């Protein structure tokens, strides 16, 4: 089902934020929100990107679309070098890669009828004729399970789940090949979350889309993703097929994450409690960034940064446990 | 118990008939989705909502022989913090940013007791240590903004425990934090329960947490308890269609589903609750009677109670 | 593209929660606030008076020395006349007359006509000056927020400087230099009054700029102009309206104060000018000062009530 053509290739992508303070800006340091991430997304697959808040997963999503201008690295989408695109070509690209946001309250313009929000892409990309646009908006709304007659209504008239559907419809307007879904169900109630997840799966199967599914919820990722990447402090620490990763996590951080997920039907098992919190991103620990919280820390960990390498075929990890 | 909010747009029946009891050393979980009334239930126990517009329209909250719902406010105030303490979802806004953690805990300690400064400080330090906060002495001198999210959450629990209450109400204490921090906090709460033999009311929307900490769980929907039973029973043998749906649609890392079951429709608006059983518009087993009559909470098996027309008054399964 | 088959997951038709149009919804919420409706009613009355009133009443500048200081209808005053020949004081009662229901001033001008004319002037000054100020404020505020960086810095420091200016003194100075005219007054108030609006709109626009729907619009490929005009401006529009309705009374008061101290446009009759006339004859003809005073009071109060009501109606946080 999945052919192995990479749709999107990210190489050594970096996004640093300079932090300054004071009236006359004085540099305090740099936050390395994304620090050397390399990833492929294959045509038709769902790549889950998992991590805790502040690990840089959302920034990574936005950097791909250049909504946050990357500091360094390479992105190529269907063979085009995204970072060298001029304004007009970038606009075309943004029709092909789309983004769905987490918060259904803030992702729709409260003063704009939802039909106009969905159709905005059509106007921007020069689909002319109000009639044609109206028909396409209606089709998009039906596709996400909303009545086309609701196009005239405003976001506040919809529930959270419905607004998320509208956000998905808006993303689908220009027939994208890749959708970056940034925690699309985290703000929804459990009973509604399942509806939206199912919808996303249906659309993927129908249109042959690829998703980059960003989430902090491993259970959701387990359901929707084909491959999973785990991110910690701006870096990918583990990447593998879903089954493989959940059955046999290599990186201690992944292990801890998995054990922290309290499965409903999970039997008892030892639980790994990480000590402390994520260190300040201004001062990431030397060596392996996870060593301050790691339950398997070794002497080498604070000294050398582990390489991200293929430990088992198709299963990558950055950890000194696997030299 | 019923708590209604009289607003300009209508009466918000936030809590519309909630009954439960809590035993010594037990953890009761109130489970429900946003707007179901679980938080208002907790606030109602201590009359912590704004009044007006809020009002406990009927019902009783019996604690140690006092009816907290109907007694004078001064009496409730004596219970707040001392006997029943509360921990909130958002530690960021629950802590006062201009005082140190130590000062805030010490103030709590002295709110109901009399300690001199040194004793209060010692007690505060012990509390922070109980919360597994490293370098507790240092932490006492920190301001909330100097602490991480997980530390703040734990400091807040410490504050709640400052008067050694017998009941702790935890309102979604782990919703705003990451999974690894959540695990730490759940661990602390479990410890508290066993070590202090404390009763905990744990409010959450996450069924998977219920399994970890709860002894019994009450599922709340549309302002009512629709099912209450020991946690194992709720999770393995749910009786109410809503509970069943809720459990089924939760993605789980130990299963491999091609497709998630889902409950159609949206959570109801507390201003405009459906007639009869509040769940009937979304229920797959809906019957005629559900649309008109509100089901009573009936006992179906020992300690397992459910409010659903699928069960008759004697608790036998009809349909 | 394969179409989804009906009945597939999550395709169930879901009823909407609330079904109002946006403005209808605001109107409904505004109606909950009685005082703001009263304010709106009075403003409406004032606008109608300002537009059509001058056609119905006599010329406000027309003097008639036979009917000096006539009291309003239903009131009477005692007038004592000292007769030099007889060396006697005769006291007569002067009653209000139906043809001058609100009385006349010391030059025999009809109070009703003057108040009606004053309504037109006050509203005109209020709306025009506020319009200029709010337009400038919105433009500079949005620009500042959207461009950011040094533009933002420069614009905001300029705003700070403008804010420290003693505005009324400036007004007096300019009117003194260029001579009193309505146009000058409107321009000066408009060109100095935008600072508060600019700051508020900037902060609102700054917070909007980080909202996901703005990012979403950019992600769709929308240009900056499109984002500003289709998303930013509509979203600050309620703030603009509220600010306008709350700043109009200030402007009206400013014009009245200028006129009161004698720097108003001598060619027009505003409430401030009437007040100015009236202050000299408070003991003999109290109504000349009291009537415009009441009008000012009611107008300012109405705009404030209405503005407050609007603010509550627009406030998304107040929604249930």
Image (spheres, rainbow, N blue to C red):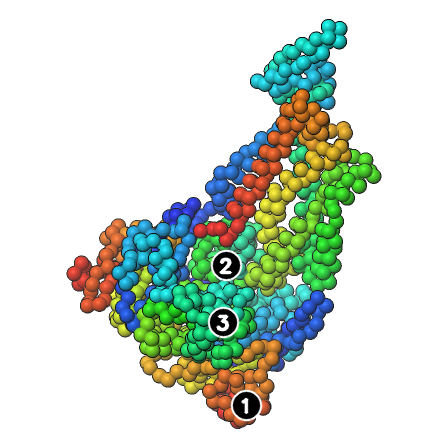
Q: Residues within 10 Å of mark 2 (few under 14, many from 20)?
A: many
Q: Are marks 3 and 1 on the same chain?
A: no
Q: Which mark is residue B102?
A: 3
Q: CA distance from mark 1 to mark 2?
A: 42 Å
Q: Using the image, name the chain to which the residue with label 1 belongs.
A: A
The single residue placed furthest to the top in the displayed view is C86
Residue at the spot x=66%, y=76% of the render? A29
Residue at the spot x=52%, y=78% of the render? B138
State whether residue A209 appears in this view.
no
How far across and down, in percent of the image, does residue A21 sit? Answer: 67, 70
Task: Depth check: give the residue in front, B264 or B304.
Answer: B304
How far across and down, in percent of the image, does residue A195 sit? Answer: 40, 64
How far across and down, in percent of the image, does residue C24 sit? Answer: 50, 43
Residue at the spot x=58%, y=30% of the render? C45
Q: Quadrant of residue C104?
A: top right
Task: Depth check: give the residue in front, B179 or B107.
Answer: B107
How far across and down, in percent of the image, does residue A271 sit? Answer: 39, 82
Above/below status of C318 relative to A234:
above
**Disc 1 marks which residue?**
A301
**Disc 2 marks which residue?**
A105
Task: Depth check: give the residue in front, B11 or B3.
Answer: B3
């Amino acid at each position: 089902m999945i052919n192995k053509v990479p749709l999107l290739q990210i190489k050594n992508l970096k996004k640093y934020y300079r932090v300054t303070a004071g009236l006359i800006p004085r540099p305090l340091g740099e936050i390395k929100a994304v620090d050397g991430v390399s990833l492929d997304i294959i045509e038709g697959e769902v790549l889950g990107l998992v991590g805790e808040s502040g690990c840089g997963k959302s920034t990574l999503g936005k950097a791909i679309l250049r909504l946050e201008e990357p500091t360094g690295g390479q992105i190529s989408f269907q063979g085009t070098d995204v970072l060298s695109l001029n304004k007009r070509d970038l606009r075309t690209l943004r029709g092909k890669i789309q983004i769905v946001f987490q918060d259904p309250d803030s992702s729709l313009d409260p003063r704009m009828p939802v039909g106009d929000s969905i159709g905005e892409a059509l106007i921007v990309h020069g689909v002319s004729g109000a009639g044609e646009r109206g028909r396409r908006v209606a089709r998009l709304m039906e596709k996400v399970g909303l009545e086309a007659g609701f196009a005239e209504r405003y976001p506040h008239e919809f529930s959270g789940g419905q607004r998320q559907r509208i956000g998905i419809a808006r993303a689908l307007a220009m027939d994208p090949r890749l959708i970056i879904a940034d925690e699309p169900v985290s703000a929804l109630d459990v009973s509604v979350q399942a509806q939206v997840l199912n919808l996303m799966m249906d659309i993927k199967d129908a249109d042959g889309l690829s998703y980059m599914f960003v989430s902090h919820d491993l259970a959701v990722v387990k359901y929707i993703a084909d491959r999973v990447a785990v991110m910690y402090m701006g870096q990918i620490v583990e990447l593998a097929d879903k089954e493989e990763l959940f059955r046999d996590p290599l990186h201690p951080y992944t292990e801890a994450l998995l054990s922290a997920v309290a499965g409903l039907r999970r039997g008892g098992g030892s639980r790994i409690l990480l000590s402390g919190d994520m260190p300040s991103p201004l001062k990431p620990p030397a060596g392996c960034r996870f060593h301050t919280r790691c339950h398997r820390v070794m002497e080498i960990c604070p000294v050398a940064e582990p390489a991200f390498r293929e430990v088992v075929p198709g299963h990558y990890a950055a950890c000194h446990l696997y030299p | 118990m019923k708590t209604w909010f009289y607003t300009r747009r209508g009466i918000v029946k936030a809590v519309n008939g909630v009954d439960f009891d809590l035993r010594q050393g037990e953890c009761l979980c109130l489970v429900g989705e946003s707007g179901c009334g679980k938080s208002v239930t907790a606030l109602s126990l201590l009359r912590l909502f704004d009044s007006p517009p809020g009002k406990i329209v009927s019902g009783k909250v019996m604690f140690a022989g006092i009816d907290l719902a109907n007694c004078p406010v001064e009496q409730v105030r004596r219970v707040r913090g001392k006997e029943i303490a509360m921990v909130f979802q958002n530690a960021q806004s629950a802590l006062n940013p201009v005082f140190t953690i130590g000062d805030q805990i010490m103030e709590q300690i002295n709110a109901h007791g009399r300690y001199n400064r040194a004793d209060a400080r010692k007690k505060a330090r012990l509390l922070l240590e109980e919360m597994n906060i490293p370098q507790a002495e240092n932490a006492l001198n920190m301001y909330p903004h100097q602490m991480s999210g997980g530390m703040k959450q734990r400091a807040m629990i410490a504050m709640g425990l400052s008067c050694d209450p017998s009941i702790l109400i935890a309102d979604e204490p782990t919703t705003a934090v990451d999974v690894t921090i959540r695990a730490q906090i759940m661990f602390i709460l479990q410890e508290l329960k066993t070590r202090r033999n404390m009763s905990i009311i744990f409010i959450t929307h996450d069924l998977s947490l219920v399994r970890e900490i709860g002894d019994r769980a009450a599922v709340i929907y549309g302002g009512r308890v629709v099912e209450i039973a020991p946690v194992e029973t709720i999770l393995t043998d749910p009786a109410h269609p809503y509970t069943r749906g809720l459990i089924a649609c939760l993605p789980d890392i130990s299963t491999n589903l091609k497709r998630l079951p889902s409950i159609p429709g949206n959570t109801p608006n507390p201003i405009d609750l459906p007639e009869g059983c509040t769940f009937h518009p979304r229920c797959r087993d809906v019957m005629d009677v559900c649309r008109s009559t509100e089901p009573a909470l009936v006992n179906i098996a020992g300690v397992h109670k459910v409010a659903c027309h699928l069960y008759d008054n004697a608790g036998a399964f009809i349909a | 593209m394969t179409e989804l088959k009906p009945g597939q997951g999550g395709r169930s038709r879901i009823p909407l929660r609330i079904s109002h149009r946006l403005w209808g919804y605001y109107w409904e919420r505004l109606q909950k606030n009685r005082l703001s409706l009263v304010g709106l009613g009075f403003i409406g009355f004032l606008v109608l008076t300002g537009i059509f009133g001058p056609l119905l009443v006599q010329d406000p500048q027309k003097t008639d020395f036979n009917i000096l200081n006539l009291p309003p209808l239903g009131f009477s005053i005692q007038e004592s006349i000292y007769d030099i020949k007889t060396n006697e004081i005769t006291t007569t009662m002067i009653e209000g007359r139906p043809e001058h229901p609100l009385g006349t001033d010391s030059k025999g001008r009809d109070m009703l006509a003057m108040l009606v004319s004053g309504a037109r002037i006050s509203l005109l000054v209020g709306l025009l000056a506020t319009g200029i100020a709010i337009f400038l404020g919105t433009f500079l505020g949005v620009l500042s927020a959207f461009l950011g960086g040094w533009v933002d810095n420069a614009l905001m420091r300029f705003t700070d400087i403008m804010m420290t200016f003693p505005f009324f003194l400036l007004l007096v100075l300019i009117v003194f230099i260029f001579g009193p005219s309505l146009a000058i007054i409107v321009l000066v108030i408009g060109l100095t009054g935008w600072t508060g609006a600019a700051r508020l709109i900037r902060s609102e626009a700054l917070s909007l700029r980080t909202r996901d729907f703005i990012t979403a619009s950019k992600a769709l490929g929308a240009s900056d102009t499109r984002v500003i005009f289709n998303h930013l401006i509509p979203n600050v529009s309620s703030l603009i309206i509220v600010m306008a309705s709350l700043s109009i009374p200030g402007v009206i008061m400013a014009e009245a104060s200028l006129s009161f101290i004698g720097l108003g446009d001598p060619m027009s009759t505003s409430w401030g000018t009437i007040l100015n006339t009236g202050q000299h004859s408070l003991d003999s003809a109290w109504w000349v000062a009291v009537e415009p005073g009441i009008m000012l009071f009611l107008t300012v109060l109405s705009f404030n009530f209405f503005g407050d009501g609007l603010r509550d109606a627009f406030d998304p946080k107040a929604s249930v």
